[in-house]
Image (spheres, rainbow, N blue to C red):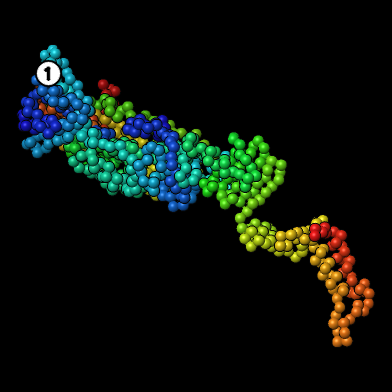
C-alpha cells in the first residue's frame, strides 16, 4: 500500500497484512558479510488473532516491501521468522499485544545438510548450490580453478561461506577477498572487493557541517558518525596492515624453522607463503606438494581471504532518508560539504568526499515518522588524509 | 594471530578441526589421483565416516600417509604400505576444505574386524603347528597369506595363501612346503636345482655332483635298492661272458683276473664296501 509517498507492504504467509502502515514497523538489513539478509518486524496484534493463527512459530514466512513509487524504486524480500516474541499484553490475561519478529531470508529455512562431491569451477558449483535457496537472482563472475570440493553434511550456507568462498579467485579480483551475500532485494552476489569498488555509485549522499542547514541538492539531512563502528571492527585485526597485505607481526621464527628443516634433510619443502612476505600459516602445508595450477589458485585465494575484514579500515555510519538503491556491496558517493570562507557558501571537503563501499545497510519503515530511513555503514580501503594536513594544523593551533 | 584463528572467528561450520574420523578405504591405487593429491605417493581414497557416507566412492577425497615410517623421513628410508581397499583407517582432516587429509598408521579397533578368531586357526603349516591363544602373533595379508611368530615358543613362519610355507619350529627344525616347483638359483639367476612335484623329478644342473654320503639309496618301483647290486651283477656278467665265435664258444681264455674288465672289480668292491645293501 502507498502511504505518505512510500510503498509499504507486509505479507504474512501469502496474505497481505491489512492493518494500517502505522501499525507496524520493520527493517530490512543486508551486509556483505552475511549470506542471508536479515530483518525485523514489529506489529500490533490487537485481537490476538495472529498469535492464535500460529504466526509466532519459527519459520513462519513473511515478505516485506519498501519503496518509493515515484522513483520506481522498490525493495521486496521474502523472509522467514527465526524468532518471534510477544510484547506485553494490552489486556492482562489476553493474547493481545505486539509481536516482534527476527527475520532472515527465506533461504535460511530451505537449507539441507547434504553429502555431495563436486568437480567444477566454483562459480558453477555456487549456481548449483544456491538453487534451493530462492534468491531472486545471482551475479557471479567466472572464477578460476577447477577442483574437487566436498560438502560433508554441510548446509548451503556452511558450504558456500566456509568452504567455497575462501577459495574464490578471478582474473580481475586483484588478489582481494571475495564476499558472498544476499541483499535486501533478494539477490545473491558473489563479488571480489576489487570488483565491488569498480562499480559506479548506486547512491549519493551529501554531508553538511550543520544538519539544520539547508542542504544543497538532496535536501536530506543526514546523521553522521565517524567513530569506529561495531560491525567489523571487532574483526578488524590490528596486526594486519591491509595496504601492504602483510602481517605487522610476522611469524618470522616459523619461517626460519621451515627453511632450516628442509635445508637439513635435503628434501623439497613447500613453504607456501600465505602473505606476500612469505609467512606460512600452517605446518600442514609443508606436507603436500602444490604443483597443481588450480590448487595454487585456491591457496592464493585463501591467502586473500584472510583480509576480508581488514579491507575497510575506515568506516563511517550515515543515517538519512530512504535510499532504496543503496544496498550492501554497492558504492555510495559521499559529498562532504564544508564552509567555503571565500565564497561564503560550501565546497567539497577533502577527506570524506569520495566513493565508499556499503558494508551494511538497513532500511527502516518508521510508522511514527511516516517515512523510511536508511542507515549505511560505509567503508573504504585506504584512509585518506589531506596531503598538506592543513586541517590538522588548524585544529592544533586553535 | 594465526590465519587459522582468523578463519575460525566467524566460521559457520560447527565441527572442530583437525577432525578425527574413521574412514573406509575405497581405493589404494593413487597412480591417477587428482589434485590436491599427489599421484603415486601412497595416498588412499577414503570415504570419511559419517561425513561422506553418501558420497560416491569414486569422488571421495584422497588421504596422505600421516608418516613415512617409524624409521624416519628420507627418500631411501621408510616403507610403502598403504592400507588395503576395503579396510578401515583413522583419518585426520586438517582443514574445512578437506584439502589436508591424512590417514594414520594405525587402524581403528572394531570388534567384528579383529582377525585372531578367523585367521589363527588357519595358521597350521600343514599340521606342524597348533595356535594357542594368544599365540601366535601374526600379520594376515589381504590375499590370505600370513606371517607369524610365536613369541612364547619361538615357532615362526610364512604361510602362503596356496598352502606353501616356510616354517621353523621351536627346536629349529625347518620345513619348506611348496607347490609344483622349488627352484634354487645362483646369484646370477642360473637355475641349479629344481624340485618338480608335477613331473616328480629333481633336476640338478652342474658340472660336477658330489654325493658325500655313507648310504645312497635309490627308490625303484617301490623298493629301496642299493647301487651295489645292479652294478655287481653287470660286472660279473661281463667277466663271465662267453663269446660265440666261428670256431666255437670261447672259454675264458685266461683267468678272468687277467681281463681288462677285472680292473673294474676294485671299483665295484669299493661301492660294495661303502653302500649298504638292502636286498
What is the residue that sits farthest to the front in this orientation?
Answer: B248
In-image side of A179 versus B224 (left or right): left
Secondary structure category for the residue under label 1: loop
Which one is in front, B131 or B18? B131
In-image side of A33 versus B203 (left or right): left
Question: What's the chain of the residue with tag 1?
Answer: A
**Residue identified by numbered label 1:** A96
In-image side of B70 versus A189 (left or right): right
Q: Residue at x 34, y 33 (%)?
A: B13
Measuring from the top left, give residue A299's x and y in whole percent. 39, 43
What is the residue that sits farthest to the bottom in this orientation?
Answer: B246
Q: Residue at x 12, y 34 (%)?
A: A14
Measuring from the top left, give residue B160's x and y in whole percent. 58, 49
Q: Residue at x 61, y 58 (%)?
A: B180
- Which quadrant does the C terminus of chain A fall into? top left
In-image side of A240 versus A48 (left or right): right
A163, above or below A237, in the image: below
Measuring from the top left, give residue A218's x and y in whole percent. 11, 33
Which one is in front, A329 or B214? B214
Q: Name the quadrant containing residue A220.
A: top left
Residue B257 seen anywhere in this rendered image of the structure: yes
Alpha-carbon neighbours of circle 1 within 10 Å: few (<14), some, or many (≥20)? many
Q: Residue at x 21, y 30 (%)?
A: A59
Q: Name the quadrant containing residue A363.
A: top left
Measuring from the top left, give residue A310's x and y in whole percent. 33, 33
Count the marks: how many?
1
What is the residue that sits farthest to the top in this orientation?
Answer: A92
- Which quadrant does the N terminus of chain A fall into? top left
Which one is in front, B278 or B31? B278
Residue A348 seen anywhere in this rendered image of the structure: no
Amino acid at each position: 500500500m502507498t502511504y505518505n509517498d512510500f510503498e509499504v507492504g507486509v505479507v504474512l504467509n501469502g496474505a497481505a497484512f491489512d492493518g494500517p502502515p502505522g501499525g507496524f514497523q520493520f527493517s530490512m538489513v543486508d551486509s556483505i558479510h552475511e549470506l542471508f539478509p536479515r530483518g525485523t518486524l514489529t506489529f500490533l496484534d490487537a485481537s490476538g488473532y495472529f498469535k492464535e493463527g500460529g504466526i509466532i512459530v519459527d519459520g513462519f514466512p513473511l515478505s516485506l516491501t519498501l519503496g518509493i513509487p515515484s522513483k520506481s524504486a522498490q525493495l521486496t524480500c521474502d523472509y522467514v521468522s527465526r524468532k518471534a516474541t510477544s510484547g506485553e499484553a494490552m489486556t492482562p490475561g489476553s493474547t493481545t499485544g505486539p509481536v516482534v519478529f527476527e527475520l532472515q531470508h527465506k533461504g535460511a529455512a530451505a537449507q539441507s545438510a547434504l553429502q555431495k562431491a563436486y568437480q567444477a569451477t566454483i562459480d558453477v558449483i555456487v549456481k548449483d548450490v544456491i538453487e534451493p535457496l530462492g534468491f531472486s537472482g545471482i551475479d557471479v563472475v567466472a572464477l578460476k580453478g577447477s577442483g574437487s570440493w566436498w560438502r560433508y553434511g554441510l548446509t548451503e550456507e556452511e558450504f558456500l561461506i566456509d568452504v567455497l568462498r575462501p577459495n574464490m579467485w578471478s582474473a580481475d579480483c586483484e588478489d582481494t577477498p571475495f564476499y558472498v551475500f544476499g541483499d535486501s532485494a533478494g539477490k545473491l552476489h558473489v563479488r571480489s572487493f576489487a570488483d565491488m569498488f569498480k562499480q559506479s555509485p548506486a547512491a549519493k549522499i551529501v554531508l553538511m557541517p550543520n544538519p539544520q542547514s539547508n542542504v544543497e541538492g538532496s535536501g536530506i539531512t543526514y546523521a553522521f558518525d565517524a567513530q569506529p563502528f561495531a560491525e567489523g571492527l571487532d574483526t578488524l585485526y590490528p596486526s594486519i596492515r591491509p595496504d601492504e597485505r602483510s602481517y605487522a607481526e610476522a611469524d618470522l621464527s616459523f619461517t626460519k624453522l621451515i627453511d632450516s628443516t628442509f635445508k637439513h634433510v635435503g628434501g623439497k619443502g613447500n613453504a607456501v607463503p600465505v602473505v606476500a612476505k612469505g609467512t606460512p600459516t600452517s605446518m600442514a602445508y609443508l606436507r603436500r606438494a602444490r604443483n597443481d595450477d588450480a590448487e595454487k589458485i585456491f591457496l592464493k585465494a585463501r591467502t586473500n581471504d584472510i583480509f576480508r575484514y581488514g579491507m575497510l579500515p575506515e568506516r563511517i555510519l550515515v543515517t538519512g532518508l530512504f535510499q532504496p538503491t543503496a544496498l550492501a556491496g554497492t558504492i555510495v558517493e559521499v559529498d562532504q560539504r564544508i564552509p567555503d570562507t571565500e565564497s561564503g557558501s560550501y565546497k567539497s571537503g577533502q577527506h570524506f568526499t569520495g566513493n565508499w563501499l556499503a558494508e551494511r545497510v538497513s532500511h527502516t519503515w518508521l510508522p511514527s515518522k511516516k517515512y523510511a530511513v536508511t542507515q549505511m555503514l560505509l567503508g573504504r580501503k585506504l584512509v585518506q588524509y589531506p596531503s598538506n594536513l592543513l586541517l590538522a594544523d588548524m585544529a592544533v593551533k586553535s | 594471530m594465526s590465519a587459522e584463528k582468523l578463519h575460525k572467528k566467524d566460521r559457520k561450520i560447527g565441527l572442530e578441526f583437525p577432525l578425527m574420523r574413521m574412514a573406509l578405504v575405497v581405493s589404494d591405487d593413487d597412480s591417477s589421483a587428482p589434485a590436491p593429491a599427489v599421484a603415486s605417493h601412497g595416498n588412499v581414497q577414503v570415504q570419511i565416516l559419517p561425513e561422506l557416507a553418501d558420497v560416491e566412492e569414486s569422488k571421495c577425497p584422497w588421504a596422505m600417509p600421516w608418516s613415512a615410517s617409524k624409521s624416519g623421513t628420507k627418500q631411501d628410508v621408510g616403507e610403502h604400505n598403504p592400507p588395503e581397499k576395503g579396510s578401515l583407517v583413522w583419518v585426520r582432516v586438517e582443514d574445512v576444505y578437506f584439502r589436508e587429509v591424512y590417514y594414520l598408521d594405525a587402524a581403528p579397533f572394531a570388534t567384528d574386524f579383529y582377525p585372531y578368531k578367523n585367521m589363527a586357526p588357519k595358521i597350521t603349516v600343514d599340521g606342524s603347528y597348533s595356535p594357542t591363544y594368544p599365540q601366535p602373533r601374526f600379520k594376515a595379508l589381504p590375499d590370505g597369506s600370513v606371517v607369524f611368530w610365536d613369541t612364547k615358543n619361538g615357532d615362526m613362519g610364512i604361510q602362503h595363501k596356496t598352502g606353501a610355507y616356510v616354517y621353523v619350529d621351536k627346536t629349529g627344525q625347518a620345513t619348506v612346503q611348496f607347490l609344483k616347483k622349488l627352484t634354487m638359483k645362483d646369484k646370477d639367476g642360473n637355475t641349479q636345482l629344481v624340485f618338480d612335484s608335477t613331473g616328480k623329478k629333481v633336476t640338478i644342473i652342474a658340472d660336477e655332483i658330489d654325493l658325500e654320503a655313507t648310504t645312497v639309496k635309490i627308490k625303484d618301483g617301490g623298493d629301496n635298492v642299493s647301487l651295489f647290486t645292479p652294478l655287481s651283477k653287470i660286472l660279473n656278467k661281463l667277466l663271465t661272458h662267453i663269446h660265440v665265435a666261428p670256431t666255437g664258444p670261447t672259454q675264458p681264455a685266461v683267468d678272468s683276473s687277467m681281463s681288462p674288465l677285472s680292473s673294474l672289480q676294485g671299483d665295484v668292491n669299493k661301492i660294495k664296501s661303502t653302500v649298504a645293501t638292502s636286498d
